[in-house]
Image: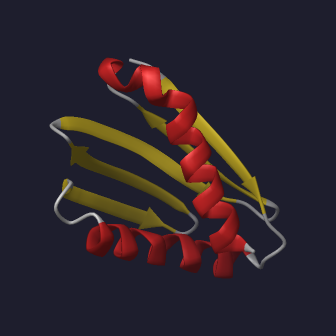
Amino acid sequence: MPTMKVTVPHSLDPAEAARRIKNLVVDVKKQFADQVSDLKEEWNGNHGQFSFKAMGFEIAGTVDVNSKEVQIEGNLPFAASLFKGRIESAIQEKARKLLA
């Protein structure tokens, strides 16, 4: 299964960066309610685990908020591997705006 890894630098307090990332999940639930299902998240401090289904595929991964960066890692279904670069770019762009 292909993996994706996105690292986004930030200059925020780690707690604030984590709060913003957590709010992103709420926005995704609203914005893509018709495309995403079974969205789950679990946080332990600044470490989160997520999973969801999109277009019939299961996607799962982790989020780590550190003092200077946010790392998002996940597994992509093989069928999505052709779009890996586009997916990583979209996540990075959204996260940069969110953490600015």
Q: Residue at x 82, y 62 (%)?
A: 68
Residue placed at 30% from the left, 49% from the top?
Answer: 51
The front one of 13 and 32 is: 32
From the viewer's side, name the closer residue of 85 and 20: 85
Residue at (24% x, 58% y) in the render:
39
Residue 44 image point, x, y percent: 47, 65
Task: State whether residue 41 is above or below residue 21.
Answer: above
Viewer-side residue, 48 vs 77: 77
Q: Is residue 52 toward the left or the right of residue 91 in the image?
A: left
Which of the 4 quarters of the picture holds residue 78?
top left
Q: Quadrant of the N terminus?
A: top left
Q: Position of residue 7 (x, y in %)?
A: 70, 47
Would you identify the image quadrant in which residue 88 lies?
top right
Quadrant in the picture for the C terminus: bottom right
The spot of residue 73 in percent (x, y) is: 54, 40
Q: Is residue 65 above or below residue 88?
A: below
Asked whether, in this view, residue 27 is left or right of residue 12, the answer is left
Which residue is found at the position 33% from the left and 61% from the top?
Answer: 41
Percent position of residue 82, x then y: 44, 20
